[in-house]
């Protein structure tokens, strides 16, 4: 094989260092790689990585005398480090990779720090201690030989600073260890007290982009790149070393014997119309799990596990067990144990009447995902040699036979030992909300396009791609110049948040990072199909838009970093969109000729406000809630009734058959003479009522309660809207936000405004929740007005609707 | 304007502008790593105090309680101000996922935390508790009452911060 030169754009934002460089990699036939650094832009940027990363990348390219089209691959530091920092780098690298349709690779940030020291001439034993915040460190020991750094540990881990110090000090080579890493900034004294006093020069404590490039080149030469060897940007994910706190606590609770807080009553699922869900196994499930195990395993060569055996397993640290449940019944479960060698899958069982529904695959996806988050890179399992259907399933998921234990399950019953690299080859499916990375060739293969493609594209310009990631939906849409939405893809994470009773910010940020490439690709594919071109290409686009705020900061950051990496390298203008303005614009999908001025009511889990839309882009907030948002009140009341999350659909379904006059709840601030709302008192009144009835031993009529609560909310919303419409002298009222999907609220607006000759617009149900089509609609207007953002735009969690640049 | 210091670390504010002014003085004293827990009923002035502090740190955008988003960041010229509203959290386990522990651990800005009193143990021993109270008894019904705002320091840095604030108001 002849020598191949590649231009690599490398970046790492896991620490306070914004590491960014462009290098030429020449790979000889024997695998040996030669790196030539062309330009570097490393600088400390404390918390401002998202503002500076995209422009630093462009600057490095320019200084190297290259353009975007010269870049053959993106390389990113996968951490460990600050979770948000790592995600900024990874999302930006994914954006770059998608825009240029080049591979995206990842390497360990700890390795990069070790290489940085090695490149500076350090030799001997090196202990990297990177800051994990919360008084914790990511430790890793290396032997810096003349040939390069050699890892002396299996996988990245996190531990208390004191424990890390003790572990390092207990090593026989403790006296030789030279310390480096940004954890020294806080913990140098603690490490010194443990006897670790040799410290590298402070200029080496952070990873350099050159160090990252060498770390990757070393992996490449060793043929050891892990799951992202394919260059598929969807597969490059952060090294977290721990689950989110919510999940960690949940596991601890499940193991500690505290009752699980999810009772599989099935009531909420029935109401919400959601069936077949997954959640971690809890102690409450043990009976049902042991029953199912007995039913399935009885009479087979397998040992039948008892309730106590499951209890023991569940209590093990590093164990992960999931159940699939449907209408209150456990229909399957799977579990695994994380060990130093990887993930050991212990049991996979599915109800015989529920086979061929993909339940085992979904369970395995969850179990192995947990394992991966805990640091496992492979999974192993044993299966009976003649269990053809199981063997076939595992093969399909990427497992291959690595061994055979003769007579393991008894004479003549052998155990086939199978192993797979993580993540498993789970296909993404439309009928399932789980955002999973898809496995397919990367860079994508582009078939020939029809010859009229340039004319088709030209006739639809401007073509704008919009990205939304402000809360718990990852969404991408493409809109054309005529305002037609060519595609709108939404990956919801609700399944991952439901059992915690609300959106968990850290989980939301993780899921966006996992889902964004797949959602982007699907949006481009659907839009391309619609234009008869097969697939839309980055070069077909005119601009890239993204939700700038308001929202969860960690969630917004993922969309913004992806959009900026994409826009910068595709050389497309960037447009920042206000999420709330998107909800207002969603009304155009129902009433295309809607013209300001009008009054709009924004009601969602995070907002409750009345807005006077004087013109598009010119808004006056007439009033908003002083405490809870309407959606939040629905969720809290649903929680108090044990109806699960989200509360809106469950309550409105119950309310449909209830008497709304059965119980009188307060209409807070109904006569306050302004447009402010208060939901906190109503929520308290409902909870007080429930407690009172419970104490009195009276059964609660759920439909009546739901209808009465809902009526109290709707009455105030509609009354204030009527006053606002009259005061502003407008003839249109619009509703936006997730709660706009509530049937009673929609009906009440029609009922009350119809006789007043005020036109009521309520967005179609499909765009009431968060989506990117509404973002695209606003972006199209901003594009026409020439209002672009520059590459320094950052996520703004507290962006106001009235904010103007 | 009638912002008065009534005792060590104790203030009386006659109106929202007074509370904002006290916030400005507070902001001028803030350093990296400072943590303040604001406690008071709705409308007691927690957000106004935060608004003033953000202003003093060179941030001129809007300041509102991040009830749903939990965390706002005001990136002023001087120092980032992390504004947390823990109202919708129910369990200390949720603090990490909400970004609070990272902001506390990063120590690169100041943290103002609303509805944080339930989580004092996790927030830590080095902090200033700020108690805001509406003095409703002192005015007729329907009138806007004055506020009492007290700063209770925990730890050496917190004491220095409250002393610096007092010195600005002497």
Image (cartoon, grey):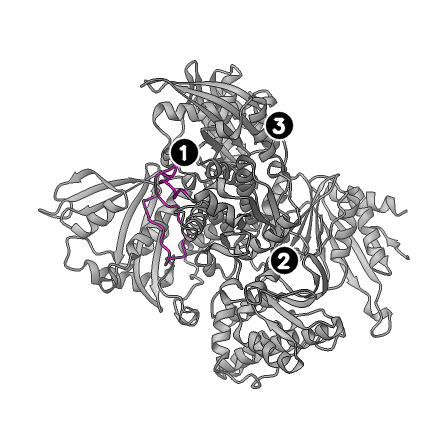
The chain identifier of the residue carrying mark 3 reads A
Looking at the image, is A671 positioned above or below residue A224? below
Closer to us: mark 3 or mark 1?
Answer: 3
The chain identifier of the residue carrying mark 2 reads A
| Residue A707 horizontal side relative to residue A339, left or right | right
Q: Nearer the viewer, residue A717 or A127?
A: A717
Residue A581: numbered disc: 2
Q: Nearer the viewer, residue A144 or A78?
A: A78
The crowding category of the residue bearing disc 3, from other C-alpha atoms within 10 Å (few below 14, some 14 to 19, many at least 20), is some
Range of residues picked out in magenta: A424-451
Is A446 magenta? The answer is: yes
Quarter occupied by residue A132 = top right
Residue A513: numbered disc: none
Are dots 2 and 3 on a single chain?
yes
How many numbered badges does the structure rendering display? Answer: 3
Does dot 3 land on a helix, a strand or a loop?
strand
Does dot 2 land on a helix, a strand or a loop?
helix
Q: Nearer the viewer, residue A462 or B65?
A: A462
| Residue A238 horizontal side relative to residue B149, left or right | left
Residue A155: numbered disc: 1
Q: Position of residue A214 (x, y in %)?
A: 46, 22
Residue named by callout 3: A43
* Camera sees residue A375: yes
């Amino acid at each position: 094989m002849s020598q191949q030169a590649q231009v690599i754009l490398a970046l790492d934002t896991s620490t306070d260092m914004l590491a960014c460089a462009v290098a030429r990699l020449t790979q000889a036939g024997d695998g040996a790689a030669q790196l030539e650094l062309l330009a570097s832009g490393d600088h400390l940027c404390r918390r401002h990585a998202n503002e500076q990363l995209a422009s630093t990348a462009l600057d490095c390219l320019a200084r190297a005398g290259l353009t975007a089209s010269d870049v053959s691959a993106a390389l990113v530091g996968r951490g460990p480090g600050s979770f948000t920092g790592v995600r900024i780098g990874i999302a930006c690298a994914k954006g770059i990779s998608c825009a240029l349709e080049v591979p995206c690779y990842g390497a360990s940030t700890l390795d990069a720090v070790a290489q940085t020291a090695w490149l500076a001439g350090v030799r001997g034993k090196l202990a990297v201690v990177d800051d994990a915040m919360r008084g914790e460190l990511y430790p890793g020991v290396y032997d810096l030989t003349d040939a390069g750094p050699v890892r002396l540990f299996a996988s990245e881990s996190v531990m208390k600073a004191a424990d890390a110090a003790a572990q390092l000090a207990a090593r026989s080579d403790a006296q030789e260890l030279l310390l480096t890493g940004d954890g020294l900034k806080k913990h140098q004294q603690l490490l010194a007290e443990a006897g670790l006093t040799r410290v590298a020069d402070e200029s080496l404590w952070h990873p350099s982009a050159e160090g990252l490039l060498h770390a990757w080149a070393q992996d490449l030469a060793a043929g050891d790149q892990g799951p992202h060897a394919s260059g598929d940007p969807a597969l490059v994910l952060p090294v977290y070393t721990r689950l989110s706190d919510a999940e960690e606590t949940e596991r601890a609770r499940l193991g500690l014997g505290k009752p699980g807080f999810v009772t599989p009553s099935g009531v909420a699922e029935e109401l919400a119309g959601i069936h077949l869900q997954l959640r971690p196994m809890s102690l409450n499930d043990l009976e049902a799990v042991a029953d199912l195990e007995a039913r399935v395993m009885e009479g087979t060569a397998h040992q039948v596990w008892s309730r106590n055996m499951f209890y023991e397993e569940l209590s093990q640290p590093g164990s992960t067990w999931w159940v699939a449940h449907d209408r209150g019944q456990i229909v399957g479960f799977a579990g695994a144990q994380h060990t130093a060698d990887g993930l050991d899958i212990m049991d996979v069982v599915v109800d015989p009447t529920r086979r061929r529904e993909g339940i085992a695959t979904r369970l395995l996806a969850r179990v192995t995902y947990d394992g991966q988050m805990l640091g496992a890179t492979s999974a192993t399992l044993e299966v009976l040699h003649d269990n053809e259907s199981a063997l076939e399933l595992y093969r399909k998921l990427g497992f291959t036979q690595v061994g055979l234990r003769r007579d393991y399950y008894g004479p003549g019953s052998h155990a086939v030992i199978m192993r797979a690299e993580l993540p498993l080859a789970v296909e993404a499916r439309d009928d399932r909300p789980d955002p999973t990375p898809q496995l397919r060739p990367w860079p994508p293969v582009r078939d020939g396009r029809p010859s009229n493609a340039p004319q088709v594209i030209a006739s639809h310009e401007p073509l704008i791609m919009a990205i939304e990631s402000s809360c718990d939906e990852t969404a991408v849409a493409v809109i054309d110049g005529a305002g037609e939405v060519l595609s709108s893809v939404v990956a919801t994470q609700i399944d991952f948040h439901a059992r915690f009773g609300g959106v968990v910010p850290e989980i939301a940020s993780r899921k966006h990072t996992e889902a964004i490439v797949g959602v982007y690709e699907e949006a481009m594919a659907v839009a391309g199909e619609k234009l008869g071109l097969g697939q839309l290409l980055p070069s077909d686009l005119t601009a890239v838009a993204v939700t700038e705020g308001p929202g969860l900061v960690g969630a917004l950051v993922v969309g913004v970093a992806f959009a900026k990496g994409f826009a910068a390298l595709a050389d497309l203008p960037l447009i920042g969109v206000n999420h709330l303005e998107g909800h207002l614009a969603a009304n155009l999908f129902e009433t295309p000729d809607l013209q300001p001025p009008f009054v709009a009511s924004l009601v969602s889990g995070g907002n409750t406000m009345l807005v006077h839309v004087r013109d598009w882009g010119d808004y006056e907030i007439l009033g908003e809630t002083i405490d809870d948002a309407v959606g939040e009140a629905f969720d809290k009341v649903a929680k108090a009734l044990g109806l699960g999350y989200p509360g809106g659909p469950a309550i409105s379904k119950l309310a449909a058959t209830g008497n709304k006059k059965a119980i009188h709840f307060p209409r807070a601030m109904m006569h306050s003479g302004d447009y402010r709302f208060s939901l906190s008192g109503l929520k308290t009144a409902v909870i007080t009522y429930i407690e009172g009835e419970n104490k009195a031993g009276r059964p609660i009529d759920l439909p009546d309660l739901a209808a009465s609560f809902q009526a109290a909310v709707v009455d105030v919303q509609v009354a204030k809207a009527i006053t606002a419409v009259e005061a502003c002298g407008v003839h249109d009222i619009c509703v936006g936000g997730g709660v706009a999907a509530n049937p009673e609220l929609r009906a009440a607006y029609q009922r009350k405004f119809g006789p007043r000759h005020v036109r009521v617009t309520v967005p179609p149900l499909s765009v009431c929740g968060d989506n990117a089509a509404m973002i695209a609609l606003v972006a199209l207007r901003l594009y026409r007005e020439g209002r672009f953002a520059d590459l320094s735009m950052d996520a703004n969690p507290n962006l106001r609707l009235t904010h103007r640049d | 304007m009638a912002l008065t210091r009534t005792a060590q670390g104790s203030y009386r504010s006659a109106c929202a502008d007074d509370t904002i002014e006290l916030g400005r003085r507070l902001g001028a004293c803030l350093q990296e790593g400072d943590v303040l827990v604001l406690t008071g009923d709705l409308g007691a002035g927690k957000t106004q105090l935060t608004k003033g502090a953000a202003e003093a740190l060179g941030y001129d955008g809007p300041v509102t309680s991040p009830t749903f988003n939990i965390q706002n960041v005001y990136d002023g010229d001087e120092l980032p101000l992390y504004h947390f509203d823990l109202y919708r959290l129910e369990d200390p386990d949720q603090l990490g996922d909400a970004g609070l522990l990272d902001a506390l651990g990063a120590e690169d800005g100041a943290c103002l935390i609303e509805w944080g009193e339930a989580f004092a143990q996790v927030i830590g021993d080095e902090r200033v508790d700020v108690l805001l109270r509406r003095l409703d008894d002192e005015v007729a019904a329907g009138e806007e009452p004055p506020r009492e705002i007290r700063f209770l320091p925990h730890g050496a840095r917190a004491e220095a911060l409250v002393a610096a604030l007092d010195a600005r108001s002497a």
